[in-house]
Image (tube, rainbow, N blue to C red):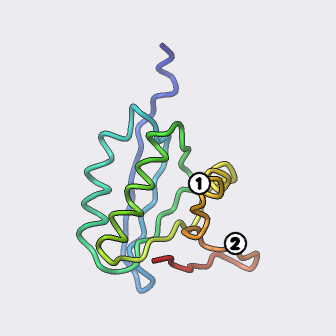
C-alpha cells in the first residue's frame, strides 16, 4: 500500500460580509474524509449565512471525497442555507458538471473572484 498519498486535510474558516468561508487543503479520499466529515457537518449546521467553499488547493481523490461535498450541499439545502463552491481546480469542475452540480460553482470572472451562491 502506498502511504505517500495519504495526506492530512486542513480546514480554514472565517466570516465576513459575504458569508462563511471554508477552505480545504489536501486530498479528500477514503482515508481523510472520516476525520473531516463531522467538522464539515458542524460548519454547515451551525450557521445561517452563505456557505462559501474554496477547493482550490483540494484534490477530490475518490468517490468518498466527492460524496462529502454532496453531503455538504444537501445539508445546507435542508437548513435553507446557500452553498457555493467559490474556487476549484479544473478536474473538480468537470466532476461537478458530470454530476449535474455545476450550479453550485461560482461563475469564473476574469476580472477577479465573484460569488454567486446557489440555494
Q: Residue at image x 35%, y 69%?
A: 76
Q: Nearer the viewer, mark 2 or mark 1?
A: 1
Q: Which residue is mark 1?
A: 99
Q: Residue at x 65, y 58 (%)?
A: 97
The answer to which quarter of the image holds residue 15 is: bottom left
Residue located at (47% from left, 20% from top): 3
Residue at image mark 2: 108
- Any mark on residue 83, and which? none
- Which residue shows up at 36% across the image and 76% down it? 81
Figure quadrant of the C terminus: bottom left
Callout 2: SS: loop
Q: Position of residue 116 (x, y in %)?
A: 56, 80
> Residue 19: x, y in percent?
41, 79
Q: CA distance from mark 2 to mark 1?
A: 19 Å
Indicate the position of residue 49 as horizontal and vertical percent values. 35, 80
- Which comes before the other along the chain, label 2 or label 1? 1
Amino acid at each position: 500500500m502506498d502511504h505517500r498519498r495519504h495526506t492530512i486535510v486542513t480546514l480554514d474558516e472565517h466570516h465576513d460580509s459575504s458569508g462563511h468561508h471554508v477552505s480545504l487543503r489536501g486530498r479528500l479520499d477514503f482515508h481523510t474524509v472520516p476525520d473531516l466529515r463531522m467538522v464539515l457537518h458542524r460548519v454547515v449546521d451551525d450557521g445561517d449565512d452563505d456557505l462559501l467553499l474554496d477547493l482550490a488547493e483540494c484534490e477530490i481523490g475518490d468517490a468518498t471525497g466527492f460524496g462529502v461535498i454532496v453531503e455538504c450541499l444537501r445539508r445546507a439545502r435542508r437548513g435553507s442555507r446557500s452553498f457555493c463552491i467559490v474556487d476549484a481546480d479544473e478536474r473538480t469542475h468537470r466532476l461537478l458538471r458530470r454530476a449535474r452540480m455545476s450550479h453550485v460553482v461560482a461563475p469564473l470572472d476574469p476580472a477577479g473572484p465573484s460569488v454567486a451562491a446557489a440555494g
